[in-house]
Image: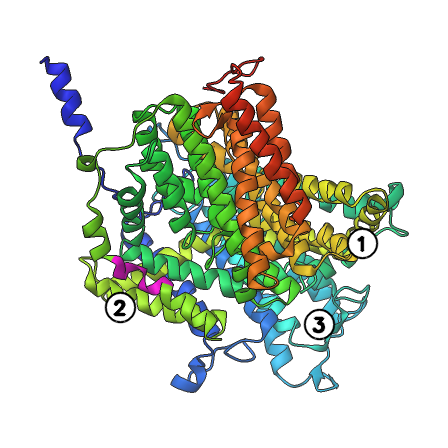
Amino acid sequence: MTEKDTISEEDTAKKVLAEGVDEEPIESNRRLFEGRAYLFVAGLSAIYAAFHMIALNGVSISAWTGISIPFLPQFPMETWNFRVAHIAGALALGFLLFSAHVFHIKKAPLRNTRVISVCAGLLLFPALVSGVTAVGFVQSIQSGTLPQMGGLTTWAAFPGTEIYEKEVWWFGIPLLIATFGAIGAGWMERRGRERFAAADVVLAVCAIVVAIYFIAIYGTAARNSVGTAFVPIGVAFAATAGSAMILELTRRVAGMALVIITGVFLIYTFTAHLLPGILAVQSAYTWQRFFGHVYSDAGILGPTTAVSSTYIILFIIFAAFLQASKVGDYFVNFAFAVAGRARGGPAKVAIFASGLMGMINGTSAGNVVATGSLTIPLMKRVGYHKKTAGAVEAAASTGGQIMPPIMGAGAFIMAEITGIAYQDIAIAAIIPAALYFISIYFMVDFEAAKLGMRGMRDDELPKLREMIARVYLFVPIIILIAALFLGYSVIRAGTLATVAAAVVSWLTPHRMGPSAIIKAFELAGVMSIQIIAVCACAGIIVGVISLTGVGARFSSLLLDLAATSQLLALFFAMCIAILLGMGMPTTAAYAVAASVVAPGLVQLGIPTLTAHFFVFYFAVLSAITPPVALASYAAAGISGANPMATSVTSFKFGLAAFIVPFMFFYNSAILMEGELIEITRAGGTAVVGVFLLSSGVQGWFLGKAAASFLRIGLAAAALLMIEGGLWTDIAGVSLAALVFAVQRLVNPKPGGGIPVRGAD
């Protein structure tokens, strides 16, 4: 035996154990503070997350401590004030933590930008002028000297008044100078990764100033003028600065795609009166009218922020507590113990682990990074091509966002928009989520069969008995599900599950004492920044849609299409949802599509839940749809494959899942509506349909490679089973039986220009 053989055997005999799955990945532009700077930012993050947990559970700090919080009307806070503070905290934290530029791994000497840093520091002066003016407004409102109207203090900021002059010259203009100046300086300023940047400090101050102004003014009668031509000009100034900061933070934490799309909508707002057809509006919108509208519950403070400030941040805290007790490591190891022996084992593990991780991680790319760092190298090791390994992980991780009980953030937005209880949405998602993962499983299994792959050996895998002995780590999730079904609110159920996660940690080596709990809150505060920025940015788009009415005009277009063909209208809705999702996080994609597309589907007579689920499902699938597929790109970074090739392959693996929304459109029993026998038949025939389509796409049917014309027959049989009717189901099964008979009796040779081994 050669030395090489010995090394190879030793390598393959190594037991696979997941470690570090729960570690939060460090973004390339995140600052890594040390010493007092770290303690300051970590403390802010922990306080920010704990503030939400306390406020959401109705705890009144004033009642408990006798301490009154200045400038805030009450605590727990009024809804708009709470959302304003929620966004301001995320902006301030985000600018301190995430740089405007990427830090390279190789410590190259930073460009000397001392002059820019000094100039950025000088911008603190106009920011403080604006802040002092805003505090003066607060004191004036609380002094009781201003006139009252209907029990509310008036705020007469009309042209020619002293208030108007102050809002323009002492508040608005200094705020815009500081905000836009600091954004520009931030692009050029270079500071060490462990140090604060002057421009970012100015932006954090500006975010707080905007919040102080909004909380003060929205407590007066001026709030009733929001969205009209009579809105105080200070609201427009503050909203302009706030929107600019939201766009800049979104660029830093989520990339340019959403920023560009938001920019297109903003340009549309001010040019819509010049456009033809359904895009046209009757009269132009002024700067004051639009920005006096967008920072309200019809825009930035609307459904997207309502959800990010309640359900989303609560479940981020829950996920942080689970990560502190290393539940992610356990989920992946459990998946290896259960599925690792199957052919193409690591790929099956990726599906199973991604489904489990999806219950605590609501982002596709985050799921890829968490589980893919282990599964992708192992898939390559057992014989998968690197682009296939990345594609499998991307496709599997994307399904996490439709996996109950903790679905992606879009599901909470769905509950907010539709008024349907989140529990009902989670129940409706059970069969669609199962169909998604079953379809990916079939695609992966047939790929492994074609390539003759083996599973992993017992000595390479964690012991199933040991994993079962630690099954108590599922208790927090079980408590969450039980609380939801017992009728507890989502907030209370999430809080109970979070407390359970801390308690369960005492049965593990990673016990959560006070320091670990503070660390979990700190982690939650940092993890929440991206989704809060994305939701706020999506709120800008929602504000444009609500002001211009473009969503209603798209709905009328869908109605016109439906007059020709309802299927054509659905296909059009699918394309819009996918196009909006290309490069955008699912949350933003669904929020926009729900405003543009879903109302039209509802007007077609489609039930509200079905219409919104249809849009949500395709918004999720956009993460693996070329040319811009975020989950696939994240997987390609781990596998070392070409990103575009990975996204095309992940699209192929997810192809069978694309018919699932059409299934529940034609048969609502798939959304758990109807009698048990109807739901059972719908689920069973849907699984058969997904199996047939996967066989057709992969060219592998019941243990044998299928000829090209048989693959077409299998795809046709699958499509016949979409509608869910008895006769179409019989026709589909009959056609599949015919394909099987031809394959066994005639035994045609695979080929016809379609390689048996597919893309690999």
Mark 1 and mark 2 lie on one chain; the one further toward the N terminus is 2
Residues at marks 3 and 2 touching, judged by CB atoms closer than 8 Å? no
Q: Residue at x 41, y 33 (%)?
A: 445
Quarter containing the N terminus? top left
The residue at which mark 1 appears reads as 552
**How many other residues sit within 10 Å of disc 1, few (<14), some (14-19) or many (≥20)?**
some
| Residue at mark 1 to residue at mark 2: CA–CA distance | 49 Å
Quarter containing the C terminus? top left
Magenta run includes residue 475: yes
**Rendered position, 418 above or below 537:** below
Report x, y in % for residue 487: 49, 75
Residue kind at label 1, given as amino acid type? Ala
Specify the principal SS of the magenta part: helix
**How many other residues sit within 10 Å of disc 2, few (<14), some (14-19) or many (≥20)?**
some
Residue kind at label 3, given as amino acid type? Arg
In this rendering, which labeled residue sits more in front, label 1 or label 3? Answer: 1
User: Disc 1 on helix, strand or loop?
Assistant: helix
Of 92 and 628, nearer the camera is 628
Of 197 and 58, nearer the camera is 58
Report x, y in % for residue 540: 66, 53
Mark 1 and mark 3 lie on one chain; the one further toward the N terminus is 3
- Which label sits on residue 611? none
The residue at which mark 2 appears reads as 503
Does residue 492 show up? yes
| Residue at mark 3 to residue at mark 2: CA–CA distance | 44 Å
Residue kind at label 2, given as amino acid type? Val
Residues at marks 1 and 3 touching, judged by CB atoms closer than 8 Å? no
Q: Residue at x 64, y 50 (%)?
A: 614
- Magenta residues? 471-477
In this rendering, which labeled residue sits more in front, label 3 or label 2? Answer: 2
Report x, y in % for residue 187: 52, 38
